[in-house]
């Protein structure tokens, strides 16, 4: 075949398959890894880099690591060369401390049960095709109160002081509370800031700008020390509760601005269409405007959530023992001192898994909600 | 007359269109300003039920503003507007009543992109008329069949062509069983080959006796279904007449100039 295009009458040319080098694995390699000289160089460098660095890191972290020992010395004695690999035995011996903090051992089943209930509450929120989702959502709204009762005690359960809370449990309590309460509050603040009522608008702006203009640490210090000045003497106001409120307010201010950005992207025609169909303000917001504005805001909202989750480590500064606090306390133990790498890597892994999970879920949501073409 | 206009021209005159003596919309000495700009000047208009009015005029003449005042998307500052026997004031109850009874079709369609075609249509009957979902979806399917796209019911608006989207928008309004339909340049954003599919639906609607106010430059449509054509300029109604006399015997110079511009471009 010399000149195929000559064999067909004008307007009668059939669709021909593309050349082999454009499709399949070959096509993918050509387009993605070797599309230009620079790209080829970068591909080769990347392969070399992975080849040189992945095996030693895996050796240190997994294959040469020591998983059970009673002290640092015993750990190092078990290695080919001292300090040549990770000593996870340390983390293992402190594992329950990392999870529960100083929560009384006899009552830890309440924390475990709360974790399980949390997963059951999160599922109906995240998975929209779950059978019986309606009841799941009602349960999810009730969950914070159930979990609060389980963890703090009272009403038939042994009371536990919140200053005994610590570790990953504390991180999850602050993170989940902050995330679930700051979203609705942020939506209200965003609507307030766009309201045509001047008082409501000014209050929203003042709140958002004050909170955004002050570092979270300063707010936490205010929560831990200064709040007492403003309260009647003798009032007992739990420190953890104060921290939860501050973290929620802090995150809500950021979320409000993210959602305001989403609201600005909604064309005026959407409001007009909703109005012209007879939907009132609340119905138009809930059915038409917010679903679209929140969809646009997903990357920003999840960004704020991830920030909030990591910022929970700041409670260390006002004396609460989050995983970092537990880690530092553990390193003070003479039997184990010097294993900072293991401790911080372990904590980093925990935060990474949680935050990466949130990031992936947000990508999945964006894809699922994409309806434009 | 140009080819473009003839394309959407009448094949046969509409027959069963009758005008009732009930007043659907009444505007008395209505004025409106955008800031300093006086958009509507002393508008007096009475529309009887079953009437089909086509409003034309140059851009900025206030014709869109006029019909948007009828369902209070725009607020007028002076004069009275009475729709379906209800006077439009700041009273939300009155506004909601009027909006339930008045459907509107926009130039930019304004479908809800996060909902399927069927959900777009069933939404207002469910949430404003308090219908059950099944009932609302049944009605939605009826109207989607009437605008000839029932097979698109489960798609999202973003997957449809402009003409299909506008037909869905018409169906969405009809699902509320409105007494009056407002059309704000429904074909201006469409590719030429999609205009007639939308106009066909509007002609069918006119033949069913719907009270219609259409801002449009489709003069073939005006000739076929309107019983009154209005020309607006500078915020005033300059001239109104039945289509026959309006097109063949325009009175004012501005109308003549406008007609010559849109018919011979």
Image (spheres, coloured by chain):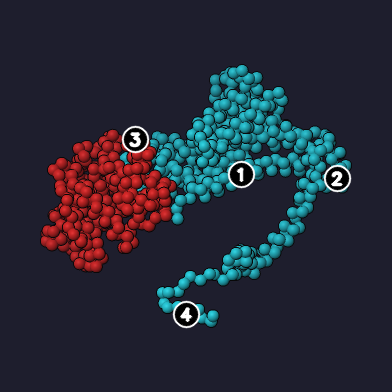
Chain colours: A cyan, B red
Q: Are marks 1 and 4 on the same chain?
A: yes
Residue occupying image coordinates x 44% and y 42%: A290
Give the Cα separation between the discs numbered 3 and 1.
40 Å
Q: Residues within 10 Å of mark 1 (few under 14, many from 20)?
A: few
Give the Cα separation between the discs numbered 4 and 2.
75 Å
Residue occupying image coordinates x 43% and y 47%: B114
Task: Check disc 4 and report the residue beneath it.
Answer: A7
Does the rendering let one see residue B232? no
Task: Check disc 3 and report the residue beneath it.
Answer: B130
Residue B259: give x, y in percent of width and height: 19, 62
Q: Are marks 3 and 4 on the same chain?
A: no
Task: Check disc 1 and report the residue beneath it.
Answer: A357
Q: In the figure, A55 relative to A239: above or below? A: below
Residue B26 disc label: none
Residue occupying image coordinates x 34% and y 36%: B131
Residue A79 disc label: 2
Q: Report whether A196 appears left or right of B72.
A: right
The chain letter under disc 3 is: B
Q: Report whether B38 appears left or right of A72.
A: left
Quadrant where the image shows the N terminus of chain A: bottom right
Q: Report whether B7 appears left or right of B164.
A: left
Residue closest to the eye, A145 or A323:
A145
Does the rendering let one see residue A96? yes
Badge 4 vs badge 2, beta-carbon distance below 8 Å: no
């Amino acid at each position: 075949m010399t000149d195929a295009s000559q064999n067909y009458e004008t307007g009668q040319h059939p669709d021909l398959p593309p050349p082999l080098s454009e499709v399949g694995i070959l096509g993918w390699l050509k387009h993605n890894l070797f599309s230009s000289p620079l790209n080829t160089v970068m591909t080769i460098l990347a392969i070399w880099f992975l080849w040189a660095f992945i095996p030693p890191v895996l050796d240190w972290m997994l294959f040469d690591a020591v998983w059970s020992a009673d002290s640092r010395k015993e750990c190092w004695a078990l290695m080919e060369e001292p300090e040549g690999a990770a000593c996870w035995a340390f983390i293992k011996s402190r594992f329950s401390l990392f999870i529960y903090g100083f929560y009384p051992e006899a009552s830890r089943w309440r924390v475990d049960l709360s974790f399980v209930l949390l997963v059951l509450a999160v599922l109906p929120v995240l998975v929209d095709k779950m059978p019986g989702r309606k009841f799941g959502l009602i349960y999810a709204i009730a969950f914070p109160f159930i979990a609060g009762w389980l963890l703090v005690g009272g009403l038939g359960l042994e009371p536990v002081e919140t200053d005994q809370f610590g570790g990953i449990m504390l991180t999850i309590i602050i993170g989940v509370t902050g995330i679930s309460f700051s979203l609705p509050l942020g939506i209200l603040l965003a609507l307030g800031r766009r309201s045509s009522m001047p008082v409501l608008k000014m209050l929203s702006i003042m709140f958002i700008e004050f909170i955004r203009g002050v570092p979270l640490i300063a707010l936490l210090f205010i929560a831990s020390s200064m709040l007492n000045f403003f309260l009647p003497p003798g009032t007992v106001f739990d420190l953890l509760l104060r921290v939860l409120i501050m973290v929620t307010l802090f995150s809500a201010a950021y979320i409000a601005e993210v959602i305001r950005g989403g609201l600005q992207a909604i064309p005026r025609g959407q409001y007009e269409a909703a109005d012209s169909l007879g939907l009132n303000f609340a119905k138009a917001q809930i059915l038409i405007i917010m679903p679209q504005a929140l969809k646009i805001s997903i990357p920003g909202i999840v960004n704020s959530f991830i920030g909030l989750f990591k910022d929970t480590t700041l409670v260390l500064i006002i004396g609460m023992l989050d995983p970092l606090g537990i880690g530092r306390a553990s390193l003070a133990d003479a039997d184990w001192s010097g294993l900072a790498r293991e401790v911080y890597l372990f904590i980093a892994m925990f935060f990474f898994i949680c935050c990466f999970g949130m990031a992936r879920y947000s990508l999945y949501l964006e894809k699922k909600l994409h309806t434009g073409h | 007359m140009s080819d473009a206009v003839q394309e959407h021209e009448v094949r046969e005159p509409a027959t069963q269109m009758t005008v009732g003596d009930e007043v659907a919309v009444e505007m008395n000495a209505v004025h409106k300003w955008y800031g300093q700009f006086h958009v509507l000047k002393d508008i007096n208009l009475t529309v009887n039920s079953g009437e089909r009015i086509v409003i034309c005029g140059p851009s900025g003449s206030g014709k869109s503003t006029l019909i948007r005042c009828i369902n209070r998307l725009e607020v007028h500052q002076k004069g009275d507007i009475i729709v379906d026997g209800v006077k439009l004031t700041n009273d939300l109850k009155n506004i909601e009543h009027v909006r339930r009874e008045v459907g509107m079709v926009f130039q930019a369609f304004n479908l809800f992109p996060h909902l399927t075609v069927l959900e777009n249509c069933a939404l207002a009957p469910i949430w404003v008329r308090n219908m059950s979902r099944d009932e609302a979806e049944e009605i939605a399917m009826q109207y989607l069949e009437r605008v000839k796209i029932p097979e698109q019911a489960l798609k999202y608006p973003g997957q449809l062509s402009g003409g299909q989207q506008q037909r869905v928008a018409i169906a969405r309004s009809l699902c509320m069983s409105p007494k009056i339909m407002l059309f704000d340049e429904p074909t201006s954003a469409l590719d030429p080959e999609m205009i007639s599919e939308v106009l066909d639906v509007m002609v069918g609607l006119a033949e069913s006796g719907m009270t219609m106010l259409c801002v449009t430059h489709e003069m073939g449509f005006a000739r076929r279904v309107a019983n009154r054509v209005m020309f607006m300029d500078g915020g005033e109604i300059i001239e109104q007449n039945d289509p026959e006399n309006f097109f063949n015997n325009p009175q004012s110079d501005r109308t003549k100039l406008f007609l010559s511009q849109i018919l011979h471009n």
